[in-house]
Image (tube, grey):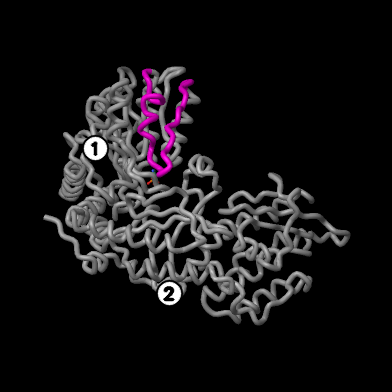
Amino acid sequence: MNCFELSTFRQQFPLLSIQVHQKPLIYFDNAATTQKPQSVIDTYQQYYSSYNANVHRASHALSASATEAFELARLKVKRFINSKSIEEIIWTKGTTEGFNLIAQTWGISQLQSGDVIVLSYSEHHANIVPWQMLAKKTGAVIKILPLTSEGKIDENSLDKVITTATRIVSVAHVSNVLGRINPIKKIIERAKAVGAITIIDGAQAIAHQRIDVQALGCDFYLFSAHKMFGPTGIGVLYGRKELLNSMPPYQGGGEMIKKVSFFEETTFNDLPFKFEPGTPNIAGVLSFSTAIDFLQQHLGDEMLNYENQLLDYCFKRLSEIKALKFVISGKPDIPLFSFTVLGHHNHDIAAALDSFGIAVRSGHHCAMPLMSYLKISGCLRVSLTAYNTVEEVDFFVESLDEILTDDYSDKVHEQAMDVNNELGQAENNIISLFKKVKGWDGKHREIMMLGKTLIRLPKEKRTDQSLISGCESLAWLTCYKDTNRQYIFSADSDAKVIRGLLVIILAAFDHKTAEQIIDFDTDAYFQDLGLMQHLSPSRGNGVYAIVAKIRAMVDLLG
Ligand code: PMP
């Protein structure tokens, strides 16, 4: 019997009560990964403190307890998705590994030149790249199912795209950008009619609806624990037993064998162990088991109804923002919204929201082909789950409104200075400027203001050579050496926040010699500025990518 009561549910997630940039965290990045309830965290810890031992191997008590709990987890997954037997449940690192496993086993052993693999335009890279690699090896070709104007795979295209040449149909149950439930039953029926195997990417569906793999009739269903309140690094490949039995193993090693000999052929273990070489992620499996208990306890009509209310409310509030443009028309099926904001770079909005304590995602969301299909370079994504609240949605919409008001980035900048003119002193000026500013929101505004001082690079200088790779948004850097052996840099980015960071970084490197540039302590500088701990990992990496590009250029110019 499951039950759902918002405050009791929410209270179980310790991370939801932390502060970010001195603001209560609002976590709207659940499609990337969900937060974990205390019970899941406890199981992880308990395994290591109470019964850590390897599974399946030793005949001692600890190992027996660990093995029992480990196999019980498999049984729970079997029941959770209603598969026929536990032999059909294979542990993987996550959804991504599931695709690679199928491509490298069934794919390599079955596909021939000219065979067709059918995907859709809205797939995650995890459901594209393994097939491209397979196609390259085998000579198979990839065909793509188009989408309707509402972002679902177009049922009307099934007969045309899925034909007797099709051997694999691999599609997402729910797209991680569009949040639409695809008509997978119809897709599976069509694939079956032409004798193709079906693989369903369940990464986004698993936490938002009940899954019954037998009712769906698919051959494979893949998902990751971390998107359903479980730990990272563990996932499930459900496969139909007959198919799994017919497939060669994926990787070799301990546990996946029956008998190993130098003189006779090595024989492989029975399912599911044939696909699980080496010591598995035991702590991951056990805490995943607790996550399933947790979800079983709550995933019922009440929770799904609540998610739907949240979805309707968030959709209504977002629809009121004039500058906001959803990437596809209509309301999504799960509370996941993707949009752009007219006149603003996605990363600028995400960074500004972060200064309000609101975690959203911006970029291509590992769906570059979908971005091209939608004719956008990226978008913002807000993804909610059952612990989010209407009040959080309200605060988010109000914050977005504030960011979009013209005066937002012009507020608080009394000591604006022309850092570009004070040669040699620029980094100290920046440090003293940032020391005067308290809190991340103030610092964020300063970064945005500094971005305005950056002289833009002419278009012809924004080339592949000047492009900085490793930055979340586009950024370019050019440089020359003057007669004093000092390096003079110019830079630009399509995101305001990156332009601001470029000003900060160039303040430290511009008009410096090669020795000064190589010796400069970037970490200490960012520490002094009080910035490093506030930058998102990807933006943090972007900062390092800029510094690396500066050093590479200096190296090149000698
Ligand atoms: N497919 C979809 C639809 C996803 O959203 C994700 C995760 N973003 C993946 C596949 C890959 O999952 P993982 O990174 O857990 O392997």
Amino acid on which disc 2 is placed: Lys
Residue 214 falls in image quadrant? top left
Q: Is residue 324 left or right of residue 190?
A: right
**C-alpha distance separating marks 2 and 1:** 42 Å
Can residue 554 be seen from the camera position used here? no
Question: CB of residue at label 2: within 8 Å of ligand 1?
Answer: no
Q: Residue at x 56, y 73 (%)?
A: 408
Q: Which residue is mark 2?
A: 23
Above or below: residue 542 compared with residue 268: below
Does the residue at mark 2 contact the one at mark 1 (Cβ under 8 Å)? no
Residue 286 in sight here: yes
* Element marked by disc 2: strand
Other-residue count near label 2 (Cα within 10 Å), few / some / many at <14 / 14–19 / ≥20: some
Image coords of residue 420 (percent x, y): 75, 69
Residue 485 position in % (x across, y down) = 84, 59
Q: In the picture, residue 59 is in which quadrant?
A: top left
- Residue assigned mark 1: 89
**Callout 1 environment at 10 Å: few (<14), some (14 to 19), or many (20+)?**
many
Residue depicted at x 32% and y 42%: 202
Residue found at x 28% / y 47%: 206
The residue closer to the viewer here, 157 or 476, is: 157
Magenta region, residue range: 138-164
Of residue 500 and residue 481, the one placed in the foreground of this image is: 500
Quadrant showing the N terminus = bottom left
Q: Position of residue 27 (x, y in %)?
A: 38, 63
| Mark 2 or mark 1: whose residue is earlier in sequence | 2
Q: Nearer the viewer, mark 2 or mark 1?
A: 2
282 or 365, which is in the foreground?
365
Residue 28 to residue 99: above or below: below
Where's residue 195, x and y in %? 31, 20
